Amino acid sequence: MNELFSSGSFLAILGASISAIAGIGSAIGVGIAGSAASGVVAEDPKKFGSTLLLQALPGTQGIYGLLIAFIILNKIGLLGGNMADLTTAQGGMFLAASLPIGIVGLVSAIHQGKVAASGIMLVGKRQEEIAKAMVYTAMVETYAVLALLASFLMVNGIAL
């Protein structure tokens, strides 16, 4: 049983799972922003489009995490039905490569949801300031994109 948990295949699949954890942060961030958006739209239904755009932004980290998970699963052959025989070191590398997007995606999506909620409140008071609200929210996205890039480059650098 201990051999299973230290096998390369298990570690690689665990890495893919950790990548997908970014989706938890996205769910929380989108929920935070959605709560703020509901209040603004209750006051002015015409602001639905602007608030929806800001609410959607924290959802990207979940997409990034899922992308890395799919890349890992495809690279190890799990999606094609022809699983590679991975060494423990290779599996550990996949696990390590998943950490940037898994951790940064989780944390940044929550914080992006908070910034988006503030931006939604700004739009609620001053519709013409949507661009500023978008810039503030997108600044948090920068770090999720960097984590995506780091995980992507690491995963693609693992030789099988």
Image (cartoon, helix red, strand yellow):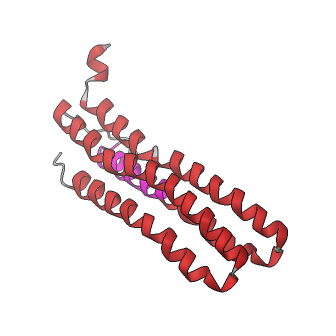
Q: Main secondary structure of the magenta part?
A: helix
Judge whether residue 155 is colored magenta. no
Residue 75: x, y in percent? 30, 49
How many circles with numbers are drawn on the protein? Answer: 0
Compared with residue 9, is residue 6 higher up or lower down, i.e. above or below? above
Q: As displayed, is residue 152 above or below residue 3?
A: below
Can residue 52 be seen by looking at this rendering? no
Which residue is more in the foreground, 68 or 141? 141
User: Could you say where residue 59 lies in the image, as x and y percent from the top left?
Assistant: 55, 59
- Quadrant of the rendered image containing residue 57: bottom right
Q: Residue at x 31, y 22 (%)?
A: 5
Q: Where does residue 68 sit, x and y in percent of width and height?
A: 37, 53
Q: Residue at x 65, y 73 (%)?
A: 122
Name, please, the residue furthest toward the top: 1
Q: Quadrant of the C terminus?
A: top left
Write down the region rendered in magenta: 61-77
Q: Is residue 128 left or right of residue 12?
A: right
Q: Quadrant of residue 91?
A: top left
Q: Quadrant of residue 127?
A: bottom right
Magenta segment includes 68: yes
On the picture, is 30 further left or further right than 5?
Answer: right
